[in-house]
Image (tube, helix red, strand yellow):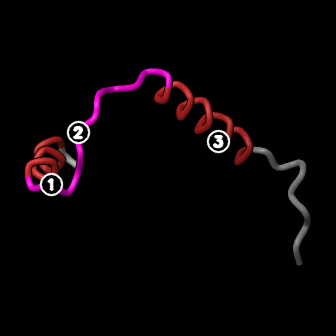
């Protein structure tokens, strides 16, 4: 979604603008990297037939 679209949602009250939270961003990126690494694993996938 584009920034103007997000700004419009804030303006009409559908979203609430909040300050950036660096700790939350780092935590979410770490979680995403971990899940991506898990998704790349193939050695623990059961052989379905």
Mark 1 closeness class: few <14, some 14–19, many ≥20 residues within 10 Å: few
Q: Compare residues 41 and 32 and report the one nearer the observer.
A: 32
Q: Earlier in the sequence, mark 2 or mark 3?
A: 2
In which quadrant is the C terminus drawn?
A: bottom right
Give the main secondary structure of the magenta stretch: loop
Mark 2 lies on a secondary structure that is: loop
| Label at residue 13 | 1
The span shown in magenta is 12-23
Q: Which residue is denoted by mark 3 in the rendering?
A: 36
Relative height, residue 30 to residue 16 (above, below)? above
The question of residue 16 being in magenta is answered with: yes
Expressed as whole percent of the image width and height from the top left, the position of residue 7 reads: 13, 44
Report the residue that reaches farthest toward the bottom: 49
Disc 1/disc 3 C-alpha distance (Å): 34 Å
Mark 2 closeness class: few <14, some 14–19, many ≥20 residues within 10 Å: few
The question of residue 38 being in magenta is answered with: no
Expressed as whole percent of the image width and height from the top left, the position of residue 43 reads: 89, 48
| Label at residue 17 | 2
Disc 2/disc 3 C-alpha distance (Å): 29 Å
Report the residue that reaches farthest toward the top: 22
Q: Which mark lies nearer to you, 2 or 3?
A: 2
Residue at image x 28%, y 34%?
18
Relative height, residue 46 to residue 21 (above, below)? below
Q: Compare residues 32 and 39 and report the one nearer the observer.
A: 32
């Amino acid at each position: 979604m584009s920034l103007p679209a997000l700004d419009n949602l804030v303006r009409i009250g559908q979203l609430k603008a909040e300050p950036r939270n660096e700790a939350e961003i780092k935590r979410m990126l770490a979680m995403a990297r971990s899940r991506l690494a898990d998704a790349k694993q193939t050695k623990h996938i059961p052989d379905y037939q």
